[in-house]
Image (spheres, helix red, strand yellow):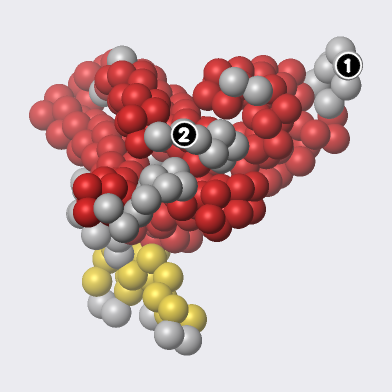
Amino acid sequence: MIGLSFGVETAPLAAERLFDIGPLTITNSMLFGLAGALLTLIFLGLAASASQLYPRSKVAYFAESLVELILKTATDSFGNRQKALRHLPFLATLFTFILLSNLSGLLPGVESLHAEVDGQEVPLLRSFTTDLNATLAMAILAVGLVQFYAVKELGLIGHLKHYFSDKPWNPVNLFIGLNELFSEFLRIVTLSMRLFGVIYAGEVLLFTVGQLAGNFAWAATLPIMFLEIFFSLVQAYIFMMLTAAYLSMATNSDGHQTSNDIKEARTQVKLKTANY
């Protein structure tokens, strides 16, 4: 049985269950994530249909400006505009969806509109990126697609050369290759934890300041909201930029690339991330 009520409380770490569809449990973050995915498709679809050489629609103009920013970032990562254009739909969709999910926690009714589930009140809506399961799923998807495109463009043997040298039976080369493979799993952890930690901490900070300010919560939380918008943009950009950098390294067609080359490229990615 589900009923509705209103209340305000900070989100717990785990997303709350709303209902089940067979063996699948639907949580409040999943419900809002589906709405965000639908909104992303509608936004990009409307922008594509209104796109012109000189766009008159504000939606199309905003979307084209956004895509140009993503294309420039991807081109810088790939060093090749044609290759960047090939992966642009994935990167643009990823950035847009994460940005909308990050900002959705600032909408009225999120975390304050409650549903009664099995005799307990739980928030009906929860920002998708404040759920660690959600950010982990996106990180697995991003890294998984990186591996898929790498195998598709280079072949399985060519892709394995990014990790192992021409003599993988050498104990040192084998250890380095296994270490590089392990770093792929670390990417999943860092991508998911960074996005979840920043967005969830921002919502907790917003709630805490609002509670402490009492009747002046509207004024006290205003600068926090602007800070949240800024970090939402930054985190969406970092996730997309790192995914583009991982794609660039994984799909490098230079068959003679050594582990040192890969490490140097990864060092550059870490330096870029540190700036944020």
> In this image, 4 relative to 9: left or right?
right
Asked whether 148 or 231 is in front, the reply is: 148
The residue at the point 44 percent across, 60 percent down is 30
* SS at badge 1: loop
Vertical arrangement, residue 156 with respect to residue 82, above or below: below
Q: Is residue 120 visible?
A: yes
Residue 257 shows which numbered tag?
2
Front tag of 2 and 1: 2
The residue at the point 30 percent across, 64 percent down is 16
The x, y position of residue 189, in whole percent, is 28, 48
Label 1 sits on residue: 53
The x, y position of residue 147, in whole percent, is 50, 52
The x, y position of residue 60, in whole percent, is 76, 24
Asked whether 265 or 69 is in front, the reply is: 265
Q: Earlier in the sequence, mark 2 or mark 1?
A: 1
Vertical arrangement, residue 179 with respect to residue 74, above or below: below
> In this image, 19 relative to 190: left or right?
right
Asked whether 10 or 180 is in front, the reply is: 180
The residue at the point 46 percent across, 34 percent down is 257
Q: Seen from this angle, which residue lies furthest left? A: 212
Q: Is residue 126 visible?
A: no
Where's the N terminus, which quadrant?
Answer: bottom left
Q: Quadrant of residue 212?
A: top left
